[in-house]
Image (tube, rainbow, N blue to C red):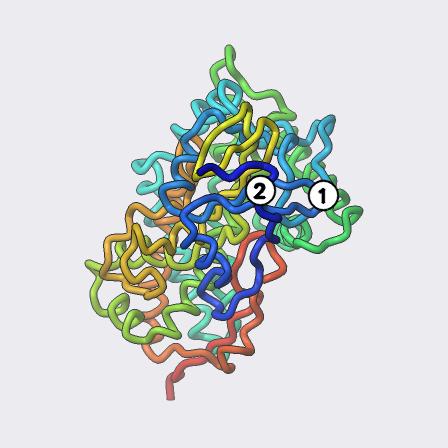
Amino acid sequence: MSVTSSGPSPVSLPRHRDCPFDPPGAYGALRERRKAARLAFPDGKAGWLLTGYEDVRELLADDRFSSDRIRASSPVRAFPVREDDPRRLGSFIGMDPPEHTRYRRLLSRWFTVRRMRELLPRIEGIVTDHLDAMERTGPPADLVRAFAQPIPSLVICELLGVPYADRTAFQAWSATLFRIDEDEEKIFAARDAVWDYMRDLVAAKRRRPDGALLSRLVHDADPAAAFSDAELTGVGLLLLIAGHETTANMLALGTFALLCHPEQARLVRERPELTDDAVEELLRYLTIVQFGTVRVAREDVEIAGARVRAGETVVASIAAANRDPARFPAPDDLDITRDATEHIAFGHGVHQCLGQHLARMEMRTGYPALLRRFPTLRLAVPVEEVPLRDDMLVYGVHRLPVTWEGRA
């Protein structure tokens, strides 16, 4: 029997975690029902929450649902995106085909597996440089500042052609944009500042071309489908912010999880053949996009036992789906020997993450290099004192104090 819009009272989006590595426990109870849950949004509207693996995959691949965020309710913020805001240009993750298709077609060739492999020597060099600096400085260290944040930031800056010296500014703007309970005025101020920064950078690339990606997009695009400067500004912003925020948090949170599971850390350190499996399992186990992905029904649709009305928002909980026991046996166990390749931490369907190959390359390089260089690496504070990013759209840790046995 289908759930209807006038059915059960809406639930609030689960946010309380009992364990730093597990999604909120309430997701498990909702998932056991094997159907959509009615969900209350901060803007006063009601929609739906999906928590099962197959249901989430179905939603993300169904073109009867739109990715247009103007039409969607946010699961964690009450204020809307402004429909007439020109800064939406280039943010293709919130677009539908055929507009989305145009962006992906022009960008995908720059993020192929082959092109990312060409970056491997440089990524290895960046990782080594930061490990050398950690060793010279000696313990203790904040792994976020010393390792997890600077590596992907430097990689994406070099790839795009963004001056790394400007990282303090764009990381601060990014932090404001990702903070859940931030004041609306501060969020729009940060949005304006980072937009102006990237707009000026695009203009500089047009005047003085270089070999980096942003410049190539400015000068090498097919004239029949070339991006405007406003579109390039939005594309550059999306690639820059996503390129350092997501991988930085995976490197830090993944290391935290491994340090709390020493046998798994030992396997990463001692068995190189497990590196790829370890990365996929950590992506599944941790799922840092903690509040899910939103879609809006274009028409009345039946999904997961719910009759979703046209215009209603559906939230797909990626974190809950990646812990679905119907797909992953013993899903709450971190097991880097399992085959977790069908996880959906990078999404599913046409909006699957453009930069996933780069993120994998950085993690496959970073985790084993860190654990081999510092085999005695451990937390410098009790687990409960590690500050978690409960307050951010992308989950992780604000700091990760670590120590190790230094040289005598």
Residue nearest the viewer, comparing 347 with 372: 347
Q: Residues within 10 Å of mark 1 (few under 14, many from 20)?
A: some
The residue type indicated by label 1 comes to: Asp
The numbered dot on residue 24 is: none
Q: Quadrant of residue 6?
A: top right
Residue at 27% x, 62% y is: 336
Q: Secondary structure at mark 2?
A: loop
Q: Secondary structure at mark 1?
A: loop
Q: Quadrant of residue 56?
A: top left
Q: Earlier in the sequence, mark 2 or mark 1?
A: 2
Q: Which residue is mark 2?
A: 7
Residue at 54% x, 38% y is: 314
Residue at 34% x, 48% y is: 343
Q: Residue furthest right?
A: 185
Q: Which residue is mark 1?
A: 43
Residue 395: image x %, image y %? Answer: 53, 58
Residue 162: image x %, image y %? Answer: 57, 42
Left or right of 338 on screen, residue 293: right
Q: Residues within 10 Å of mark 2 (few under 14, many from 20)?
A: few
Left or right of 193 on screen, residue 217: left
User: Taking the image as drawn, is residue 208 in sight?
Assistant: no
Residue nearest the viewer, comparing 339 with 400: 339
Residue nearest the viewer, comparing 341 with 403: 341
Residue 178: image x %, image y %? Answer: 63, 51
Residue 198: image x %, image y %? Answer: 64, 37
The residue type indicated by label 2 comes to: Gly
